[in-house]
């Protein structure tokens, strides 16, 4: 595991990975997008990831592992004319070419509330006056992103893989992330086409993994409420989850 994924001993695992989409195929080959997030997994998890409503301690821990010298903040989405959803680096470069300013590379942070956090390597336009603006359209119509600037990494042809942080200790979630990492490894070794933002891989290598990934997605979505409840942190003055009606401090937490 890379040093940027370091975490405290009592935190849940952080996995680096790239999940994939299968939009098209031909004979024994499969064409996968070069996207690097669960939102492109082609299943139900992409519908669960959203921009966090607030910057939580878990988010700060994730971002600190990515770059401890910067802090995350919200950036307005204002798509540039002609910008495309899956071309975030190209969109920022074009904006600099036509309007000046610079590119700021960093991480777009997503959450599946109570389940996981994910950071995708991203690029925003730094306006000449210094304000950050995300010029890439969001397919879900969100007005802003949570962005953590990176003071070191830059994107050339191959961006860093996504980083995912589990918020629950779930064998199903761990298995899902492991399968996603296997798919990502196949993609990394595939034939990449930068013009179309796709990767050509062997269908026989990916189809069983994509099916398993989808099955695990469905299981996670079905059980998400139970998973959250099982791992919810209860404050001392909260009502005890056992149903006694007393505060947690005066009930189960008291031993």
Image: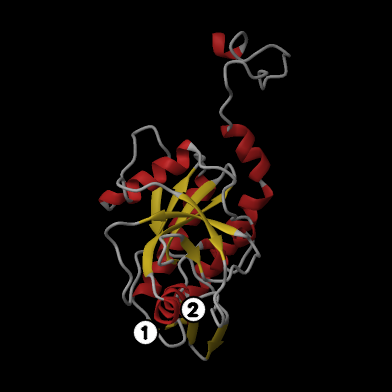
Vertical side of 210 occupied by 57: above or below? above
**Among the 4 quarters of the image, the one containing residue 194:** bottom left
Circle 1 packing at 10 Å, graded few (<14), some (14-19), many (20+), is few
When the figure is inspected, residue 64 is found, relative to residue 198, above or below; the finding is above
In this rendering, does residue 255 appear at all? no
Q: Are marks 2 and 1 in contact (CB under 8 Å)?
A: no
- Please give the name of the residue rendered at 63% of the width and 55% of the height, measured from the top-left corner: 48
6 with respect to 38 (left or right) = left
Q: Relative to 127, is 69 above or below?
A: above
Total numbered labels placed on residues in the image: 2
Question: For the residue carrying disc 2, how many other residues have a C-alpha within 10 Å: few (<14), some (14-19), or many (20+)?
Answer: many
Quarter holding the C terminus is top right
Q: Residue furthest bottom?
A: 27
Which SS class for mark 1? strand
Which residue matches tag 1? 191
Q: Is residue 3 visible?
A: yes
Q: Secondary structure at mark 2?
A: strand
> Of residues 6 and 137, which is closer to you in this image?
137
Report the disc number at residue 32: 2
Q: Position of residue 178 (x, y in %)?
A: 43, 56
Scheme by which the image is coloured: secondary structure
Q: Residue at x 52, y 62 (%)?
A: 38
């Amino acid at each position: 595991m890379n040093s940027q994924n370091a975490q405290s001993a009592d935190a849940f695992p952080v996995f680096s990975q790239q999940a994939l989409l299968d939009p098209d195929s031909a004979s024994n080959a499969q064409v996968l997008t070069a996207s690097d997030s669960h939102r492109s997994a082609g299943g139900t998890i992409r519908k669960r990831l959203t921009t966090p409503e607030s910057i939580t301690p878990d988010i700060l821990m994730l971002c600190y592992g990515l770059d401890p010298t910067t802090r995350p903040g919200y950036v307005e989405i204002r798509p540039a004319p002609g910008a495309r959803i899956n071309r975030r680096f190209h969109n920022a470069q074009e904006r600099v070419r036509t309007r000046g300013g610079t590119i700021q590379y960093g991480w777009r942070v997503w959450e599946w509330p109570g389940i996981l956090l994910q950071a995708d390597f991203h690029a925003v336009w730094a306006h000449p006056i210094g304000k950050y603006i995300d010029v890439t359209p969001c397919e879900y119509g969100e007005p802003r992103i949570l962005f953590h600037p990176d003071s070191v990494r830059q994107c050339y042809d191959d961006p860093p893989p996504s980083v995912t942080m589990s918020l629950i200790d779930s064998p199903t979630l761990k298995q899902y992330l492991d399968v996603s990492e296997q798919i990502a490894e196949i993609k990394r070794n595939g034939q990449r086409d930068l013009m179309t933002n796709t990767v050509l891989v062997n269908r026989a290598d990916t189809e069983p993994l994509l099916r398993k990934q989808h099955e695990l997605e469905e299981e996670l979505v079905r059980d998400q409420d139970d998973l959250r409840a099982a791992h919810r942190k209860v404050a001392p003055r909260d009502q005890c989850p056992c149903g006694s009606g007393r505060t947690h401090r005066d009930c189960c937490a008291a031993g």
